[in-house]
Amino acid sequence: MEISAAAQWINSTFASFDYALLEFFHNLNIGPASGFFDFFMGYFTKLGDDGIFLILLSLLLMVFKKTRKVGAAMLGAIIIGALFTNITIKPVIARPRPYHDELSIFHQWWIDAGSHVESEFSFPSGHTTSAMAAMTGLFFTTNKKVSWTAFLFAIVMGITRIYLCVHFPSDVIGGLIIGFIAGLLAAIIVNICYKSDAKLFKWIFNFDLFKKKKS
């Protein structure tokens, strides 16, 4: 695989940072608690596969009138994040996965972590982007005194990607930043739609599937 200039710049700029964190999580992987971490990281990361769990959660929230705004913001954030990440940035940057070079130490660490095969490009982390986007959309459309804890989901999702050695830590940082921007944009759009006088928006947001009909 030919490495783009952008990917080369990221690799060189964050080389020390990426190595240090990947080594830290590799040590967890081979440590005495590796059984627990392998189980937890392996199953938690599946919650981000193709964004299916988050999409279904968003759609479920949209069914109920009281949580429709949150669900709409989360779903919109996931879509915007995917457009930014999978459609635009990943193919442009074209950064290879940590395990791409079979002669590198990262390839061996990837094998030790379970050899999880992912799509071709690494930057930014799609799992982290979608998780952060959804949680940011949730944060800006609910009580912020409580909803800030949702960011922990995105952070842990990013950690699982590093632990499994399918992403560089800098990929995860990129995903967190892009996800936050996507979530913020989605929340702004949803808030504008909620305040709109357009009949379509009013019907969509006020429709109550479970409202009892007057006899």
Image (spheres, rainbow, N blue to C red):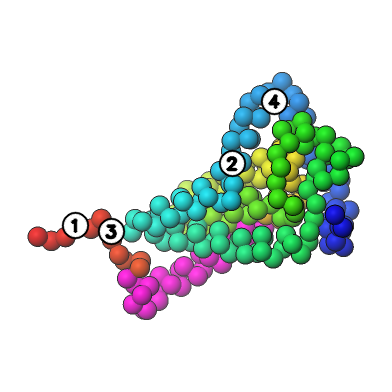
Residue 88, position in %: x, y?
Answer: 69, 65
Q: Which of the two marks, 4 or 2, is nearer to us in this view? A: 2
Estimate how packed mark 1 is, as few (under 14), some (14 to 19) or many (20 or more) residues with alpha carbons within 10 Å.
Answer: few
- Type of the residue with mark 1: Lys
Residue situated furthest left in the rendering: 215
Q: Is residue 183 magenta?
A: yes
Residue 73, position in %: x, y?
Answer: 48, 61
- Type of the residue with mark 3: Leu
Q: Which of the two marks, 1 or 2, is nearer to us in this view? A: 2
Residue 209's disc number:
3
Residue 89, position in %: x, y?
Answer: 72, 63
Measured along the vertical axis of the image, is residue 3 above or below residue 30? Answer: below
Circles 1 and 4: CB distance less than 8 Å? Answer: no
Side of 2 relative to 52 (left or right): right
According to the picture, the residue beneath numbered tag 2 turns out to be 46
State the CA–CA distance, disc 4 to disc 2. 18 Å
Give the residue displayed 83% in from the left and 58% down from the top. Answer: 7
